[in-house]
């Protein structure tokens, strides 16, 4: 079925990708340096036939023995708190890491997929966001290190496609949740669920009127797999168009956990996008894909996971 290199394979999305690739009969080489990844996320895969793990920083030259059919670059810090704490690593993995992984794909004649993000749209002035929107990004704000690294990564990927003829795919990933998110990564899903389970104040930033659209991880991973197997090199949004305010989201988590936690309002972080919802018209037509897991079901699975690890 082909051999895949997955960077960031011990992270939240990376580990679910490794699982899906193994299930579908691929060999998987998983690379991670554990800056934000966690060995526990792939512990159950170690020793399984077709799976190998390499601890490595992909901003350095990468050497892989043997053939490769697919390269998926998922290594990156991915939460606003991570970008604040690791701004240089965030920039390096999105720029140098993308360059190095593209180099591997070119050398091996492998198909390449870059994990891009809805953050390329910044604080969007167009709603919902379609792939042809160029975005509204502050390059020098606190999120600029992530947003600009991913915008550079997209440009680099298109350059390798146009100039070197590498077969490439770009997925723009919108807010995703599920088991194996880091409890303390500062993102809204682990924050609200862990606060609700501990009956601690649920920290809503701003007045909670900003919106997000949350996709369950299995839906996202299926969309990414189909995109990889498609033939379109241009960016494709993958996410769930079910949009809600952050305050509604807090109340939903409170209800599902049966928590008595109070809701407390905190200052809105700088450049926090006010609205976000993917337009998935393209993914529906090109990939015959759309999310199928209802929010309540996905949240229950995520809450069960956090109950186990808290
Ligand atoms: N947020 C919040 N409380 C938290 C963490 C996040 O109200 O404890 C808000 C945040 O301001 C943003 C939304 O939830 O508007 C989603 O934040 P997250 O960090 O998950 O990712 P983003 O979508 O901003 O990249």
Image: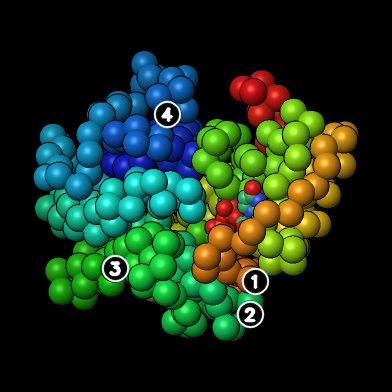
Say which element carries label 4: loop
Disc marking residue 152? 3
**Residues at marks 1 and 3, CA–CA distance in whole angstroms:** 23 Å
**Residues at marks 1 and 4, CA–CA distance in whole angstroms:** 31 Å
Instruction: Report the residue that reaches farthest toward the top.
Output: 47
Question: Which callout, 1 or 4, points to the residue nearer the camera?
Answer: 1
Say which element carries label 2: loop
Badge 1 density bin: few <14, some 14–19, many ≥20, Cα 10 Å: many
Cβ–Cβ below 8 Å for labels 4 and 3?
Answer: no
Q: Residue at x 49, y 73 (%)?
A: 121
Q: Is residue 29 above or below residue 130?
A: above
Question: Which callout, 1 or 2, points to the residue nearer the camera?
Answer: 1
- Relative horizontal placement of residue 180, taking residue 199 as reference (left or right): left
Badge 3 density bin: few <14, some 14–19, many ≥20, Cα 10 Å: many
Pointer 2 residue: 127
**Residues at marks 4 and 3, CA–CA distance in whole angstroms:** 26 Å
Pointer 1 residue: 275
Say which element carries label 1: loop
Residue 107 in the image, given as x and y percentages of width and height? 12, 53
**Residues at marks 2 and 4, CA–CA distance in whole angstroms:** 35 Å
């Amino acid at each position: 079925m082909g051999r895949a290199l997955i960077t960031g394979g011990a992270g939240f999305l990376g580990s679910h990708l490794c699982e899906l690739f193994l299930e579908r009969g691929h060999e998987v080489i998983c690379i991670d340096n554990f800056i934000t990844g966690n060995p526990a996320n792939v512990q159950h895969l170690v020793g399984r036939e077709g799976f190998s793990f390499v601890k490595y920083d992909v901003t350095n030259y990468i050497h892989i023995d043997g053939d490769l059919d697919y390269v998926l670059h998922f290594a990156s810090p991915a939460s606003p708190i991570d970008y604040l704490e690791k701004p240089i690593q965030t920039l390096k993995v999105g720029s140098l890491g993308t360059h190095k992984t593209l180099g591997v794909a070119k050398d091996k004649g492998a198909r390449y997929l870059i994990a891009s993000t809805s953050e390329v749209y910044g604080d969007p002035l167009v709603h919902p966001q379609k792939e042809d929107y160029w975005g509204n990004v502050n390059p020098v704000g606190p999120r600029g290190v992530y947003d600009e690294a991913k915008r550079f990564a997209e440009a680099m990927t298109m350059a390798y496609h146009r100039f070197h003829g590498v077969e490439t795919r770009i997925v723009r990933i919108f807010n995703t949740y599920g088991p194996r998110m880091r409890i303390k990564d500062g993102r809204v899903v682990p924050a609200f669920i862990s606060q609700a389970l501990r009956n601690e104040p649920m920290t809503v930033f701003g007045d909670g009127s900003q919106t997000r659209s949350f996709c369950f991880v299995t839906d996202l991973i299926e969309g990414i797999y189909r995109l990889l197997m498609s033939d379109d090199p241009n960016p494709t949004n993958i996410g769930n168009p079910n949009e809600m305010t952050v305050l509604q989201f807090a109340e939903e988590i409170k209800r599902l956990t049966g928590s008595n936690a109070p809701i407390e309002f905190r200052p809105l972080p700088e450049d926090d996008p006010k609205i976000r919802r993917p337009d998935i018209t393209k993914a529906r037509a090109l990939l015959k894909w759309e999310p199928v897991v209802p929010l309540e079901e996905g949240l229950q699975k995520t809450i069960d996971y956090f109950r186990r690890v808290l």
